[in-house]
Amino acid sequence: MSRKITFLTLFLWLMTVTFPVIAQQKADTTCIFRFVPQKDMFYVPWNGNETELAHLLEYIENNKATILDGKLPLLVDGYCNSKSCEVKNLATAKIRANRVKSELIIRAKIKEENFITHNHATEGDFVTVRLTVPLKETAVTDAEAEARLAAEPTVADRRERQKAEAEKAAQQNTLADTPSETKITTDYHLSLRANLLRWATLTPDLGVEWRICPSWGIAVNGSWTSWTWSDKDHRYALWEVAPEVRYYMGEKKAWYLGALFKAGQFNYKLSETGKQGDLMGGGITAGHQLRLNKALALDFNLGLGYLNADYEKYEVIDGVRVRHGNETKDWWGPINAGVTLVWKLF
């Protein structure tokens, strides 16, 4: 009797090990497609992409009916971190994901609605395609079948759940693809500048700024004017060139510190004595850019530092300029101020 009990126990154990019940299990299949850094072209015969594509097409073909019915979406994630800023990384990741999807749509004869797409400005230069393939079920007991049937949602429940998941995925995808306001403020490389304070004093002022990256920029402003009146007895003329290196700070990269160099020439005669000569100096600048819209901003800035002016004094007698010696002056304090209109070109 004891031998029968032992044999029965061993038999039941073997049945459990040899014939496991596999019900409603799923296996994740992920294929990775590599991209050249900073590029968005999908090169199929490169870096293992052809092999990955062949595997993926086989999985799709084996589950095509389920995919086309919308019950088995393909999860596509585009990645890029080789561009200069987050906005460009997201844009490149989106193009890469779309190129992979286009290849699958053409080759596997599936549709755009069979994909759920997310894009990321992190990790590397690749696109992943993942689908959760259901495994084949083996035999189950009547009790398990009844329990599974009772737990199975109705057709209406499945449709509601699929609709909710699709809406959630679309919302997440939109948030991933849409640059935030913070990103917009840093997404430009070249802009035109005009110091409105200088223009208010009838001194035309124009410049450019090249943003190397979101945190660093190089700006160059130039001014020029030449005015005479009272039969040339009064004169106001100058030219200046002021290159500047800036470091932008904060989440929105709106505040900045900079180093300014200034050089130029001037000719002022607003009273009986005129002054004509050269100026040169430099200092530290600070400012804030107020974003007006995607293309325009106002730049408020102030510079403190040192200026040296080496000039000659003169008088005009009967239309003739009479020189009255040279002077040199040093100045410590404000050397630059501006309310500058910034126009983003690209």
Image (spheres, grey):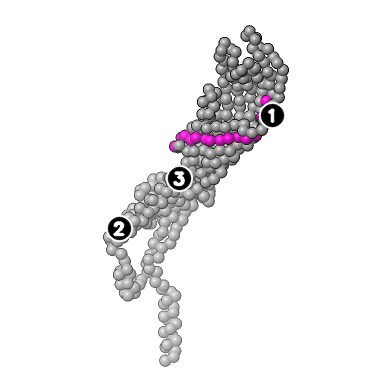
Q: Is residue 224 magenta?
A: no
Q: Nearer the viewer, mark 1 or mark 2?
A: 1
Position in image of residue 243 (x %, y %): 61, 31
Per the rendering, the mark at residue 180 is: 3
Of callouts 3 and 2, the N-terminal one: 2
Q: Nearer the viewer, mark 3 or mark 2?
A: 3
* Residues marked 3 and 2 touching at CB (< 8 Å): no
Q: Amino acid at mark 3?
A: Ser
Q: Amino acid at mark 1?
A: Asp
Residue at 39 percent of width and 45 percent of height: 106
Few, some or many residues within 10 Å of mark 1 (<14, 14–19, 20+): few
Residue at 59 percent of width and 31 percent of height: 336
Cα separation between marks 1 and 3 = 47 Å
Of callouts 1 and 3, the N-terminal one: 3
Position in image of residue 249 (x %, y %): 56, 43
Residue at 66 percent of width and 14 percent of height: 315
Q: In this orientation, does residue 114 appear?
A: yes
Q: For this rendering, which residue is in front, 332 or 218?
A: 332
The residue under label 1 is 330
User: How many numbered badges does the structure rendering display?
Assistant: 3
Whether residue 19 sits left or right of residue 154 in the image: it is right
What span is in magenta?
293-309
The residue under label 2 is 159
